[in-house]
């Protein structure tokens, strides 16, 4: 495998640290540049990965011109994905954009168009897509273990986006209180709120489990926390031709799922015509019911190959073998997920059921 040059641009989302760690640990990657208009936000990454000063930039244009990367990781605020994709695409680089896809379907389509004109690939990173339980669940579905999928139940979130930094490092309540008034996560204009932060996970992976099926209509309800302009809890019901699925997002779970699974548990329950699968984040097993085992049994999760463990490894494997990105990180599946998110936003705002937006 050739050596691939990678740059990380815009550190709005703390997942940039996670994604650059994937690049740092990849045997065929070189981090050739990092860029953010606020240098302090890059400090931890620069120190942790030993990035030389001449590879640290505050102007994305100079970063791209000097380093000429093959692949750029973008982590802007949700409402800025379209703008940053439009700015970076003309430099002829492949892109990994950290979730969500965009703040709207129109913005997502503009991103698709920009990358199509550039002739390069666009991948949307949904961290849940690399969890072994969910990968195992998709394999079982594709093998017909539970028949045709007819329901997807999703509940996910955490204590809140400010309670941890990159690599799930916990912070104090005092730090959260100080950061909350300043954070884009809590600004409506920047795409904040639990619905936009987490709903795309559920709708995109559900679309993957459902092999690309689209719902007919969507009903959404969000909370309205006093003193906040964004939601911290949303419940969304999607009606498909074959039945109903439910997606629930929550900032404010009792515990973070990577330390102690809260109740309700974070993850998916999939119902098929011939069985069910529970697939919870971070679990070492999935639980399966089928016609031969109606009482259910626990199945160890798959040991994933390196190319299925994180977005950097996966995208580089696709590029190395001349393949298009597929599955939940692809624009085809992620766009359907975004359609459901847009419909949910409209439904919550208008307080009524709406048809799927297109």
Image (spheres, rainbow, N blue to C red):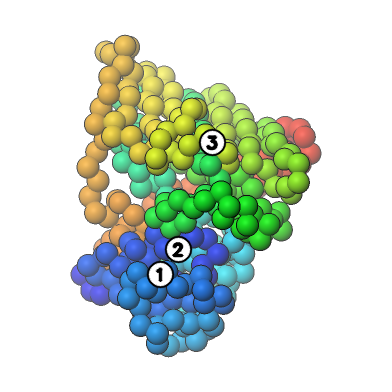
Between 302 and 342, the one lying in front of the other is 302
Label 2 sits on a secondary structure element that is: helix
Label 1 sits on a secondary structure element that is: helix
Label 3 sits on a secondary structure element that is: loop
Res 214 visible: no
Position of residue 320 in the picture relative to residue 255 (left or right) = left
Residue denoted by label 3:
253
* The furthest residue to the right: 350
Position of residue 26 in the picture relative to residue 224 (left or right) = left
| Residue in the image at 40% along x and 87% along y | 54
The part of the image, by quadrant, that contains residue 272 is: top left
* Label 2 Cα crowd, 10 Å radius (few <14 / some 14-19 / many 20+): many
Contact (Cβ within 8 Å) of mark 2 with mark 1: yes
The part of the image, by quadrant, that contains residue 323 is: bottom left
Q: CA distance from mark 3 to mark 2?
A: 23 Å
| Residue in the image at 48% along x and 82% along y | 57
Q: Residue 51, percent across and down? A: 35, 78
Residue denoted by label 2:
16
Q: Earlier in the sequence, mark 2 or mark 1?
A: 2
* Label 1 Cα crowd, 10 Å radius (few <14 / some 14-19 / many 20+): some
Contact (Cβ within 8 Å) of mark 3 with mark 1: no
* Label 3 Cα crowd, 10 Å radius (few <14 / some 14-19 / many 20+): many
Residue denoted by label 1:
45
Rendered view: 25 above or below 301: below
Position of residue 258 in the picture relative to residue 226 (left or right) = left
Q: Residue 52, percent across and down? A: 35, 83
């Amino acid at each position: 495998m050739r050596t691939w040059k990678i740059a990380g641009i815009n550190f709005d989302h703390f997942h940039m640290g996670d994604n650059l760690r994937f690049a740092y640990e990849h045997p065929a990657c070189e981090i050739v540049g990092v860029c953010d208009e606020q240098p302090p936000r890059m400090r931890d990454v620069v120190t942790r990965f030993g990035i030389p000063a001449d590879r640290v930039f505050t102007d994305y244009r100079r970063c791209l011109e000097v380093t000429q990367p093959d692949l750029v990781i973008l982590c802007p605020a949700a409402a800025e994905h379209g703008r940053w994709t439009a700015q970076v695409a003309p430099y002829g680089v492949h892109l990994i954009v950290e979730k969500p896809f965009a703040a709207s379907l129109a913005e997502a389509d503009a991103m698709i168009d920009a990358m199509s004109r550039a002739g390069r690939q666009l991948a949307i990173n949904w961290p849940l897509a690399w969890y072994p339980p969910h990968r195992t669940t998709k394999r079982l579905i594709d093998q017909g273990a539970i028949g045709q999928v007819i329901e997807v139940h999703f509940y996910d979130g955490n204590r809140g986006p400010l309670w941890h930094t990159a690599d799930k490092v916990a912070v104090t309540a005092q730090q959260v209180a100080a950061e909350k008034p300043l954070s884009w996560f809590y600004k409506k204009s920047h795409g904040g709120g639990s619905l936009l932060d987490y709903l795309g996970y559920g709708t995109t992976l559900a679309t993957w489990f459902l092999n690309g099926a689209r719902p007919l209509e969507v009903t959404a309800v969000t909370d309205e926390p006093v003193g906040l302009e964004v939601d911290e809890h949303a419940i969304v019901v999607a009606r498909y031709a074959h039945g109903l699925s439910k997606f629930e997002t929550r900032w404010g779970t009792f515990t973070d799922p990577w330390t102690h699974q809260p109740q309700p548990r974070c993850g998916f329950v999939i119902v098929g015509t011939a069985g069910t699968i529970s697939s919870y984040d971070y679990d070492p097993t999935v639980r399966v019911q089928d016609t031969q085992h109606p009482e259910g049994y626990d199945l160890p999760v798959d040991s994933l190959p390196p190319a299925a463990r994180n977005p950097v490894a996966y995208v580089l494997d696709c590029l190395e073998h001349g393949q298009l990105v597929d599955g939940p990180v692809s624009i085809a599946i992620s766009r359907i997920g975004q359609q459901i998110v847009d419909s949910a936003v409209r439904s919550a705002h208008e307080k009524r059921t709406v048809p799927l937006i297109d």
